[in-house]
Amino acid sequence: MFYRENGQFKSSYASDQQMLPILQDRVFMLGLLAFAFLVVPFVAGDYLFLSILIPFLILTLAAIGLNLLVGYCGQISIGHAAFMAVGAYAAYNLALRLPQLNFLVVLVLAGLIAAAAGMLFGIPSLRIKGLYLAVATLAAQFFMDWLFARVKWFTNYAHSGSVSTAPVELFGWKIDTPVEKYLFLLGVLVAFTLIAKNLVRCQIGREWMAMRDMDVAAEVIGIRPVYAKLTAFAVSSFYCGVAGALWGFVHLGSWEPLAFSLNLSLNLLFMIIIGGMGSLLGSYFGAAFIVILPILLNQVPQWLGVPISTAMTSHLEFMIFGALIVFFLIVEPHGLARLWAIGKEKLRLWPFPH
Amino acid sequence: MKKNGPAYLLGAALLVGLIAPLASGASPAGFYVEVLLGGLMTGVLYSLVALGFALIFKASGVFNFAQGAMVLFAALAVARMAEAVPLWAAIVLAMAIMIVLAWLIERLVLRPLVNQEGVALLMATLGVAYFLDGFGQAVWGSGIYEINLGIAKEPVMILEGVFQGGILVNKDDFVATIVAAALVAGLALFFQKTPTGRALRAVADDHQAAQSIGIPLNRVWVIVWSVAGIVALVAGVIWGTKLGVQFSISQVALKALPVVILGGFTSIPGAIVGGLIIGVGEKLAEVFLGPVLVKAFDLAGGGIENWFAYGLALLFLLVRPEGLFGEKHIDRV
Amino acid sequence: MKQKAKFAVLAASLAVSAAVASTAALAQAEEQFFPVLVYRTGPYAPNGVPFANGYVDYLKLVNARDAGINGIKIAFEECETGYATDRGVECYERLKGKGPTGATAFHTLSTGITFAVTDKTFADKIPIITAGYGRADSVDGTVFGWNFPLGGTYWGAADMLIQHIGKKEGGLDRLKGKKIALVYHDSPYGKEPIALLQERAKMHDYELLLLPVTHPGVEQKATWLQIRQQRPDYVFLWGWGVMNSTSIKEAVATGYPREKMYGVWWSGAEPDVTPAGEGAKGYNALVFLAPAGRGAVHKDVLRYVYDKGQGAGKKEDVGEVLYNRGMTAAMMTVEAVKRAQIKYGKKPLRGEQVRWGLENLHIDPAAIKKLGFDGFMTPVSTSCLDHEGGSVSYIHAWNGKKWVVQAGSYKPDMSIIKPMIRASAEKYAAEKKIAKRDCAKEQ
C-alpha cells in the first residue's frame, strides 16, 4: 500500500538512472541519514559509541572493500586485514614524518599505498583462482604481520613494537570525544559508500561482475582480466587501507602488529557472507551482526540470571558464533541483504499476500 | 610433458637454496643435517594434518577449514581420557568420538549445503572450526595436557664418527615418522584394495556418475569424514606428544594449508611430499636465511618461517597452478 | 512457511540488538566495584587461570573475613579478554562505569592491553595497576599519571637477571665476550626488556642474541636450532602461556642445559615446568613479590573461602606461584583503597580517589606481617613521582617437584634505568601531547 511506484513517472534518462528511483526509498534513506547524523549523537551513551557504533562504522567500510573484491569480482581473499595494516602503518608514518599534511590527505595517501600493496598481492589472481587464490592471499596476511613486526622503520624504532597516535585534528577541530569520532566516521562512511555504489553501477563494476560470473566468457567478449582483477584488488585494498587507518587512529589510538591478525580477516569474510555477498547493504548488515554478536553473547547469561563462569561464557560465545554461521549459511546463503530484499518485495504487495 | 620453463627455474633455485648453507661453509655439516632432520620431522607433522585436508577435498570437494580444530579436539579427548583409563582405551574411545563427530558434521552441516558454492562450504567449515574450538575447551578444559606414549624425551647423539660432534636426534621424531608412514601405507591399501576405498575414489572422480551406479553418496561422505577424523586423531596424538595438547594447536594446523597447495588439493602423495618440502624449506630458511636478512636489513629478529611456507606455495602456484600432484583444471565456457 | 521462520529470526535478532543499546543502571548498594580482567580460555589460559583465582579468592576473603574494606563490601565482575587487545578494551569500556562510583582500578594482565588502555585513562580517571608488567617507563608518574607498575618492571627484571649471572660469573666485568640469548614472546611484553639488555650489552660487552617467537609460541623448533648453532652461555626466557612450556621442552629436545636458562617472573610458574616433566629440572626464574608456598593468609583463605565452598579453583592449587601473585595484586589494590579511605572517608571511592591511595601506598614489613603475607610480599612504597614503589627480587629453581628459592636478593640498578625511564616518558609525552603533572602542586 505504501511502497508503490504509482504516479512516479520519469521524464528524463537521468532521473530514470538515479540510485534510488522510488520516492519512498529516497524518503527512507534521507530519514535514516537524518536520524544517524542528528538524533543518535544526542541519544546514545558513551559505551554505545565506543564499543558498538565506532567499530561498526569502520568495519563496514572494510567490509564494503572486501565485498567489492569477493562479492562483485569473485576473487576470494582471506588475508584482507593485511591491507588494513598497510593503511594503518602508512597513515602513522605519513602523520609522523609529514605532520603538516591534512588528515584527509593522509587517509587518501594511506589508501593509495594500500591499493598498491593490494595490486601486488593481487597478481597471483591472474594465474590462480578459487580456493587456491584464497590460501595464496593468506601469504599477504602473514607477510604483512611479519613485515610490520620486524622492519623497525615502520614503527619508528619503538622498542616495544607498539605505535601510538595523537587524536585526529581536522581543520582545527580536535576529534577526541566519542560523539565527534562517530560523526567524523559517519561522514567518511557515507562518502565512501556513495563512491562504491557508483563504481558498481558503471562500467568497471559490470566488468567485475562479468569476471565473477564467467571469467572465460568475459575474456572472450573483450573484458581484459588483468585490468578488471587488478582494479578490483586496488579499489578493495584502498577501502581497507582507509578503514585500517581509521581503525588505528580513531578507534584504537595505540596498536601493535597483532591488531590486524588473521582473526580480523576471517571476521571481515564472515561479515560479507552473513550480510550478503555482492551487496553494499549486506556489508552494513554483516558488520552490525559481527560487532554486536559477541557483546550480546556475553551479556545474555547475565540477563537470564544464569550464573555461568566467564570461561564457559567465552566457550559458549565461540560455539554459538560457529553454530550461527553454519545456520545462516544453511538458511539463507545469500545473506541478510537477501532477507531485506524479500522484505521489500513483500512490502510492495502489502496488505495483499500475492 | 610440455616443457615448463619457469617451473624448472624454480626447481633449480630451490635446489640451490637447499645446498647453499652446506656448500658455502656457513655451517658445519653435522648441524646442517640436524636442521634438515628437524625440517623433515616438522614436515611429517604438517603432512599428517594435510592428509586430512586432501582426503576430504578429494572425496567431497569441501575444503575443511575445521581440520585443525578436529586435530585439537581428538588430541584433547585422548589426553583427558588417558587420565582415567589406559592410553590404548583412550585412543579407541577417541576414535569412536571422532566417528560420531564426522557423522554429525555430515548430517547437520554438509547435507543441507550440498549444492552451494565453494566459498559457502569453506565458511561453513570455518563455523564448525569455531564451534569445535569452543566445545573442545568447554568439555576438556584450557590447560596444557600431556599425552604420554612412554618415549624418552632426552635426545640421543648418533653418527659421532661421521660428523664432527655427532647429530642430535629425538626418539619421538622417529616414532612420528614411522607412524606417519604406516598411516599412509594403510590409507593407500584402503583406497586400492577395499571396496569402500574404491567407492571413495569413484565419488572423488565424479559424484553423479558414482551415484548413478548405486554408490550411496551420503554414507561415503560419512566414511570419508570419519577417516579424516581418525587421521586427525593420529596427527593430534603425535603433535600432542611433542608439544603438549592445548588450544593453540588448532592454529598451528593452518600451516598445513600451504602444504596442500603445494601438493595439490586432491592428492595424498602430494600432501606428504608437500609437507616434507615445506618443513625442510621453512627450517632451512629460518636458521640460515634468517640471520642473513636480519643483518642485511637491520630487522628486529627473524621469524621468516611464519610466511615462508606461504611464499613458497605462492611461487609454486604461479608456475604450476594445480600443485605438484594435482589435477589440471579445465574450464569450459 | 520457511520465509516466515526467516523473518521471525530476523525480527528477533533486531529486537535483541536494540536491547543491547540500553545499559540498565541497577540500584547500587554501598559497594566498591572491582573489575577483574581475566583470560580463562585460549593459549594463555594455563597461566591466566591461577592468577585470576588468586585475585578473586583474596577479594572474597576480604569480604568474608573483614566484612569488606572498613565495612564497604567488594563487588567484582570478571571479564574474559583472551589476552586479545580489542577484547580487553571492550571489557574496559563495559566495566569502567559499573558500581556506585565506577571501577576501582584495572589490572589489565597484558602489556598489549595496557598500551591500548593507557590513553583512555587520562579522560576516564581510572588507575591501571600493572604490577610486574606493562610499560617500563610508566614508573614516571608525572607523565603516566594513571599507570602503576607496582613492585617491578621489565627493565628492572632484565637488570636483575644480568646482575645475577654477573654474580655467577664472578663479576659483571667477566661478562665480556659472553653470549646471552633472549627468547621472547613477539609482543610488547616480550620486547620491553630489549632496550635494557642492549644498554647493559654496551656497558659489559656481551653479545645479545634476539630470538622472537610468534604468538602463540608453539613452534619453536627453528629458534632452538639456532640456539644450538650459536651456543649462548645463557638463555633468558620472556614467554607467556603455552610458549613457556614449549621452550623448556625444546630445550630438552636440543640438549640445552636448563640450569643456564633464566625466566622472567612470568615464565617461572608450575604450568610452565610441569608439562616438561623431569626435563625441567634445574630451570631458574625470577620471583615477583611472592614465591610458591603457603603462609598465614593462605590459612585464612582456606578457612574463610574454600571451607565454605567458595573457592575459585582447586584447593591443591592454593599456594602456587601465580596464585600467590594474584593474591598480592588484589591485596595491593585493597590496601590502596584503605589508604584512600583515610583521606576521603569510609565510603565507595572513585577512581581518582583510589589513585591518591595508590600514590601514597606504604606497605612496609610490619604491614606485610599484619596482613598475613610474611614471606609472600616485598615492601612497596609509592609516590607521585615513583609509581613503582621499589623492586626487590630473587631467583627460584625447579627441582623437579617444587620451586626452591635460592639465596641472594637483587634490586634493579636505578642509575641505569632512571635515565631510560625519563627519556622514554618524555618521548611519549611529546608524541601524545600530554601535559606533565606537577607533583608538588597536587600534594
Image (tube, coloured by chain):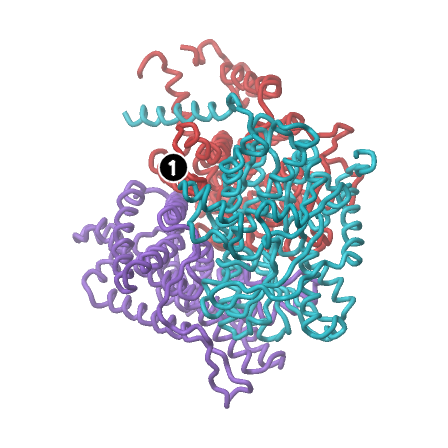
Chain colours: A red, B purple, C cyan
Instruction: Give the residue drawn at x 37%, y 49%.
Output: B136
Number of numbered labels in the structure image:
1
The kind of secondary structure element at disc 1 is helix
**In the picture provided, is B100 more to the left or to the right than C196?**
left
Q: A41 or A78, which is in the foreground?
A: A41
Residue C210 quadrant:
bottom right
On-image quarter of the N terminus of chain A: top left
Q: Residue at x 70, y 56 (%)?
A: C155
Position of A297 compared to C225: left or right? left
Give B320 or A224, whichever is nearer the viewer. B320
Q: Can residue B187 be spotted in the picture?
A: yes
Is C223 above or below relative to B154?
above
Rendering quarter of residue A193: top right
Above/below status of A43 relative to B181? above
Q: Position of residue A145 (x, y in %)?
A: 59, 53
Q: x, y (%) of residue B127?
A: 39, 44
Quadrant where the C terminus of chain A is found in the figure = top left
Going by the image, does C21 lie left or right of C359? left
Q: What residue do we see at 35% from left, 68% from top?
A: B149
Classify mark 1: residues with Cα within 10 Å, few (<14), some (14-19) or many (20+): some
Choose between B156 and A132: the one closer to the eye.
Answer: B156
Q: Which residue is mark 1?
A: A324
Horizontal and vertical percent for residue A39? 59, 17
